[in-house]
Image (cartoon, grey):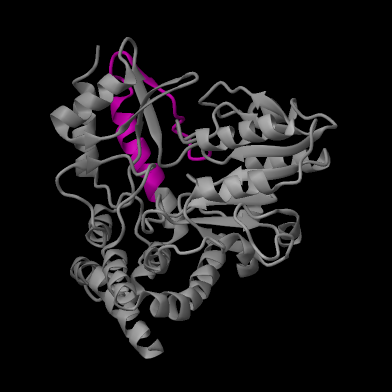
Amino acid sequence: MSDRRSFIRQSAAMLGTLALHQNVAAAFPGIQAPKLNALSPTSNDEDFWRQIRQAYAASPNIINLNNGGVSPSPRATMDALDYYNRMCGEAPSYYMWRILDQDREPVRENLAELAGVSPDEIAINRNATEALNTIVFGLDLKAGDEVVLSKYDYPNMMNAWKQREKRDGIKLVWVDLDLPSTDEDYLTNAYVSKFTAKTRIVHITHIINWSGQILPVRSIADAAHKQGAEVLVDGAHSFAVLDYKIPDLGCDYWGTSLHKFLCAPLGTGMMWIKKEKIAGIMPLLSNNEPNGTDIRKFESLGTRSFPIEMGIGYSLDLHNMIGSKRKQERLHYLKNYWMSQVKEVPGIKFFTSPSPKWSCAIGNFGFEGKKPVEIADQLFNKYKIHTVAIDWEKISGVRVTPNVYTTTDELDKLVKAIRGMGV
């Protein structure tokens, strides 16, 4: 059985990257496919990135620029997902519980390696909401304890904290921000100014989903720890986007979705808790050792999709082949590619900085006098460009999020569409 699974894994990977390897060989004579990661192409090497696109199951019928929501998976991931679904369908209880349940460990180890942490600190779950809600509801907080968070955090996280406020009497202290910003002191002090002797938790969104603003997590976290508070980071839009390791952030708890920029199957996520803090977090779902130190206590989900979990490894393989640094540079290049060409369009307004320190893949723009939903509808109805309208706090625009499979030809169409909207 082990040999069979190994053969299938290798076969699926080959199916998903065969076209990529063949095209790379044609574009770079004399370069063998296994040396792809050593090619070191630049962020604007369109020949190289067109080969990368061939590895993805991206629709040719629409221009998908909402990868910040969910991203298409590599072809190898989809092939593997089909196989594992068929396997489980043949004898579910045997293949699920006796075979694939054990195969979660290599996936855990590989995710931990990318994140720069111990596998014993990683739990695999379904999305960032589940990861972060598990921590929010598992923390030992009492009435009067203060939690510092932002009005620009993700709604599911804010709602979780509001439920704790209603249930347990904790106090929520809200940070307001003027965005976009490239002022690290301003962004840091916006949080630090809210700290008191009662601050227990500081909730920070690494990259704000509404606009792509990167926050200075480390400087905020260091200040929080000096105050005696712990730090929870929402990494949904930064993992597999920015070239970093979780310890670089200096946080205590962290969660992400894997179906965004890692391009894993839909409904996959990851939670990280610093080893010495695992025992202090109660699982969201029941476990026989709720105060135990094994991170796996957070994976007591009952029956779930093992094929989806197995598919993570194939997406991770392609990410590693591209390389985190190269991927970040390409995503930033794509964002600035379209933004720089429309900055002179009359009436346009940007809610995202062009700086690589303060933004990466996500860009947000709007027009004076136009509602975001009107802009998004026009982009899709006339040009088949899929984006998302954002109307949140002081941000009123359309979020544009390419991924590494996005071509500059597609972004040229976006530029043409935006120029046609100028007032």
Query: Could you tell whether 74 is left or right of 316 in the image?
Result: left
Task: Tell me the residue at 35%/39% (across/down).
Answer: 401
Query: Could you tell whether 370 is left or right of 358 in the image?
Result: left
Residue 188 visible in rendering: no
Please say if 418 is above or below 243: above
Label tally: 0
Report x, y in % for residue 202. Answer: 70, 37
Quarter where residue 396 is shown? top left
Quarter where residue 271 is shown? bottom right
Residue 331 on the magenta segment: yes
Report x, y in % for residue 373. Answer: 30, 22
Report x, y in % for residue 122. Answer: 59, 62
- Observer-nearest residue: 361 or 377? 377
Residue 100 visible in rendering: yes
Query: Could you tell whether 142 is left or right of 84 in the image?
Result: right
Please say if 25 is above or below 323: below
Start-end of magenta stretch: 330-357
Please say if 247 is above or below 377: below
Q: Which quadrant does the C terminus fall into? A: top left
Please say if 305 is above or below 185: below
Task: Tell me the residue at 70%/60% (across/down).
Answer: 290
Task: Tell me the residue at 44%/55% (across/down).
Answer: 258
- Observer-nearest residue: 96 or 204? 96
Residue ranking furthest to the right: 197
Query: Could you tell whether 379 is left or right of 250 in the image?
Result: left
Task: Tell me the residue at 23%/25% (across/down).
Answer: 377
Q: Which quadrant does the N terminus fall into? A: bottom left
- Observer-nearest residue: 133 or 348? 133
Residue 345 on the magenta segment: yes
- Observer-nearest residue: 252 or 365? 252
Report x, y in % for residue 88. Answer: 34, 73
